Each structure stands twice: as C-alpha cells, then as structure tokens.
Amino acid sequence: MSRANKVVLAYSGGVDTSVCIPYLKHEWGVQEVITLAADLGQGDELEPIRQKALNSGAAVSLVQDVREEFVQDYAFAAVRANTLYEARYPLSTALARPLIAKILVEAAREYGADAVAHGCTGKGNDQVRFDVSIAALAPDLKVLAPAREWGMSREQTIAYGEKYGILSPVKKSSPYSIDRNLLGRSIEAGILEDAWQEPPEEIYLLTKAIADTPNEPTYTDLHFEQGVPVALDGEGLAPIALVEKLNAIAGGNGVGRIDMVENRLVGIKSREIYEVPALSVLIAAHRDLESLTLTADVTHYKRGIEETYSRLIYEGLWYSPLKQALDAFIANTQQRVSGTVRVKFFKGNATIVGRKSAYALYDESLSTYSEGDRFDHKAAEGFIYVWGLPTRLWSEKSRTI
C-alpha cells in the first residue's frame, strides 16, 4: 500500500534528492513524483537540473525563480532582526527553508498532490525546518522523508541510484557537501569533519584569501530605509542587485568567512564553514545604525528578541505564532532606522567608520567635552544621588545585621 499517490519533491539535483525519485516510486509505491527546484541564486544551470529530474523518473519537473522574494521577505527580515545564531551564523542557509516549504505546499495544491517530500537525512536541521514549516502551512499534507528512513550509506545510496541510471556528482577529490544561495555558501564533510584541521583554501569561492586581497582599503556607504538596505554608494539598487554587488565587494576583501562548531537541533555538534559576505556586513551595518537611532531601552530589549528570533529561524519555527508576534515588535522598532553607514573593508575586516541619520539621537553638543557643551553638569549630582539611593540604603542596613 503506497504512502501517497502523488508527491511534490523538493529537488536540488544532488544524490539524495535524485535517488528519492525512483525510491518513492519503486519502494513506496508512489504513482507520480513531481519535482520542484527553487532558484535561490545558487548559480547552477537549472535547465540541466530540471532535465535530470525527468531522466530520474519524475513525471513533471518544475523550476521556480524565488530569488527576489528570498532576499526581500526573508533575508532583509533577518537583517532587521540582526539574526546571528549563537552570535556568529547569519542563517544564510536556514532562511531558505521556510520559503522552499511554502512553494512546495503551493505546488502540491496546484497539482492536487496528497504529500510533499524532501531528501533530508535524520542528522541535519533541514528535516525539522521542512517538516515543521509544512505542518504549519498545510497540516493535512503528508510529509515523506525517504533519506531519513531508507538506512542506506552514502555508497549504497549512490549504488541504488546507478541501478536507475542516476550518476553521482560526488567525486573522491571533492568530498564536500555544499549548499549555496544568493546569501552565501555552507560547506561541510570531508576533512572539515576534523575540528582541528584548518579548512583548505580550495573550499572557498565567494571570499578571497587575505593574501590575495587589495593592499588599500575599500570604503562603501550602505543606505537603509526603515531597516531595509536600499542603496549602495548612493545608487539605489533592487534587493538582488544590492546583495550581489555587496557580496563582490566584501568577498573581494576577504570578508565573510565563518568557521564554527555549532549546536544542531538534533543534539549533536557540527563543524560548519560559511561564506556570507553581504549578509554579515548588512547585519553589522544595520545594528550600528540602530545604535544611532533607537533609544537605549529599546536597543537593549531588542537584543534579547534578536537571540530568540535567530533561534526560531534555526529551529524551523518561521511560521510559528511567536515568530509572528516578534515580527510586529521588530517592525515597530524600524520606523526610524533610516540612514547611511560607512564601512571600511581591508584585509578580511569590515569596520564601521561612520554613520548618519535624520533620526539620530546622538547630539554632539551634549556629548562634546569641548566648548559649546550644553550638558548640565550640575544636574549629574542629584541624578547620581537618586540613582544610587537603593544601593546606599542596602549598604546601610547591611551594617546593622
């Protein structure tokens, strides 16, 4: 008895998702497999991927360009929330998963499928992100995960695919598992599984080695409107163009490499390498602009919100009620986060060296120690007395005990 009659499969063209097609049909009795490849700016030729799905047994092979939606609605939402999982990872890969889940559900509705499927294994985070997102959007749809259940090793999976004419793109000389989109790349497996080993230079594509970067600094002005990046060096740019141009500038100066051991959702630690030039710079610049335009209490409170928001994205809870509530809070905080931030790129560093805004709460006449100081120094004594009064009383009472 089949688990489903018609299935929409999230398809990348890799080993696991390709093998999923014959496996669903021959082992689980699925009558029709429809594949869906999302164009997230990964740079691949998508027509060969579409054709590979058909050659692997798919009845229909879809390719959907979601680059603009990905940047505008997902990446820039993360920028406004300053998302950094475990204070380091800007969630470049994780942000794509709720969008893929969304278009999977839409395709399932359009084609009358009774299930959706993915090629995630039981070790990774993506299985959780897909399953939970799909459950939130379409709780009536079944979610099938063949790679989580088939129990085959990598070698056995490749051999199974070869029985049905599916050739493996994985070579012994390049054993890495790579995920790429407009925001960056994640690289794992191979020698990288040894947390002591330095990553070989060959794994990087978007960022230059420090030795190969310019010997003079590069300055770039980023302009934001209500927390959203809209211009670079005075030139208004559409979301995709802005990210691509900033990727080239930051990556060309060696900015955006992350080597970390992160805590996966399934309870294991994983050594991950990320290249995220534009996204890491946008978050740093946006956070700096907030320091200029938000009050102290909002800034401090938002930091806790940002940590929660980052964790929700990492843990697959993009469509959760808490995420929606936090979206409303963040949107309110961004009303005056408009202005320009100047970034200095040099030898792997992106340093904020200037910021300005019509909504700036920084007042030089109050901050200066030079002539023209408008701060009332005499008022400080009374403020300190009242501010320190609880501490003073506590200390006095402690002496009598």
Image (cartoon, helix red, strand yellow):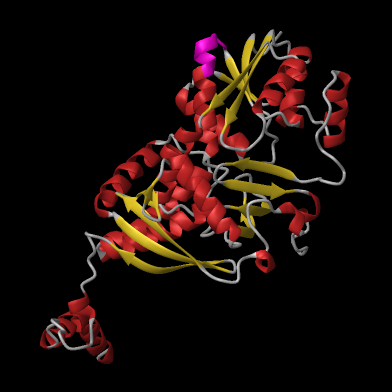
Residue 273 at what x, y percent from top left?
66, 54
Q: Is residue 397 above or below residue 235?
A: below
Decide whether residue 269 is among the magenta residues: no
Residue drawn at 87 percent across, 24 percent down: 162
**Observer-nearest of 64 and 253:** 253
Q: Residue furthest bottom?
A: 399
Q: Is residue 68 above or below residue 104?
A: below
Residue drawn at 56 percent across, 35 percent down: 40
- In the image: residue 162, left or right of residue 20: right
- Image quadrant holding the N terminus, namely top right
Residue 153: image quadrant is: top right
- Magenta region: 107-113
**Observer-nearest of 375 and 272:** 375
Residue drawn at 68 percent across, 10 percent down: 59
* Residue 219 shows in the view: yes
- In the image: residue 351, left or right of residue 124: left
Decide whether the magenta segment is chiefly helix, strand or loop. helix
Residue 128: image quadrant is: top right
